Amino acid sequence: MKHSSAAAALFALVLTALVVAPALMAQDIDASATEQPADPTPRAAVPAAPDMLADVVPSVEGDATVQRGRYLVALANCGQCHTPRNADGDLLNDQWLEGAPVPSVTPQGYPQWAYKAPRIAGLPQHTDAEFVTLMTTGINRDGKKTMAPMPEFRLSKEDAETIAAYLRAVRR
């Protein structure tokens, strides 16, 4: 019997939340639409958000497509293999995506391993169509799969195109 009264109380609470809360929210929305601000003085402009990728990916000039490509390059960690490092192992951002020795060792018994990541700044080795195919299928321009440790990406065509736009913008 205790269970049924607890269930009834829970049902009543849920029913109240589903019926009463939307009605109260609608009243608040209606009231806020007619309210005038107490102080009509214009507000100062909100400062631009800081560049959250500045420590990860060097900035480049470009439209929203290029900037989204920059974000995706940061997310995929492309610079970790495609950018040279100094003696301490830090990335050399003045040589961003210029190609570099792969910083990880080949797992024992793994025959297909790339020892050098190619230059991708400016996409000198690919047409945009070849690069999009690589990023959407994992197949390179020679019709072969990428060599580890390069992942076989399966990006959307749109994401692959935005990355290509960013990489073209990173010309040296």
Image (cartoon, rainbow, N blue to C red):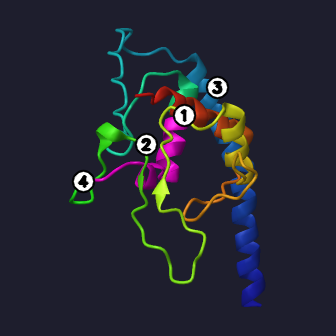
Give the residue number, with chain letter if any, for mark 4.
86
Q: Earlier in the sequence, mark 2 or mark 3?
A: 3
Relative to the observer, which residue lies in front, 91 or 130?
130
In the picture as drawn, the residue positioned furthest to the top comes out as 41
Question: Could you tell me how far apart the alpha carbons at marks 3 and 1 are, in whole angstroms?
Answer: 58 Å
In the picture as drawn, the residue positioned furthest to the left comes out as 88
Closer to us: mark 2 or mark 1?
A: 1
| Residue 46 sits above or below residue 101 on the image | above
Evaluate if marks 4 and 1 touch, with contact meaning CB atoms under 8 Å apart.
Answer: no
Q: Earlier in the sequence, mark 4 or mark 3?
A: 3
Question: Could you tell me how far apart the alpha carbons at marks 2 and 3 are, in whole angstroms?
Answer: 54 Å
Which kind of residue does numbered mark 4 sit on? Asn
Q: Is residue 80 left or right of residue 28?
A: left
Evaluate if marks 2 and 3 touch, with contact meaning CB atoms under 8 Å apart.
Answer: no
Badge count: 4
Q: Is residue 86 left or right of residue 108?
A: left
Evaluate if marks 4 and 3 touch, with contact meaning CB atoms under 8 Å apart.
Answer: no
Closer to us: mark 3 or mark 1?
A: 1
Measured as percent of width and height from the top left, residue 64 is found at: 55, 25
Q: Earlier in the sequence, mark 3 or mark 1?
A: 3
Question: Could you tell me how far apart the alpha carbons at marks 4 and 1 are, in whole angstroms?
Answer: 24 Å
Q: Is residue 13 left or right of residue 53?
A: right
Which kind of residue does numbered mark 1 sit on? Pro
Label ID, residue 97: 2
Q: Secondary structure at mark 2?
A: loop
Relative to the observer, which residue lies in front, 140 or 25?
140
At 30% across and 37% down in the image, what residue appears?
94
Q: Secondary structure at mark 1?
A: loop
- Other-residue count near label 1 (Cα within 10 Å), few / some / many at <14 / 14–19 / ≥20: few
Membership of 80 in magenta stretch: yes
Question: Could you tell me how far apart the alpha carbons at marks 4 and 2 are, in whole angstroms?
Answer: 14 Å
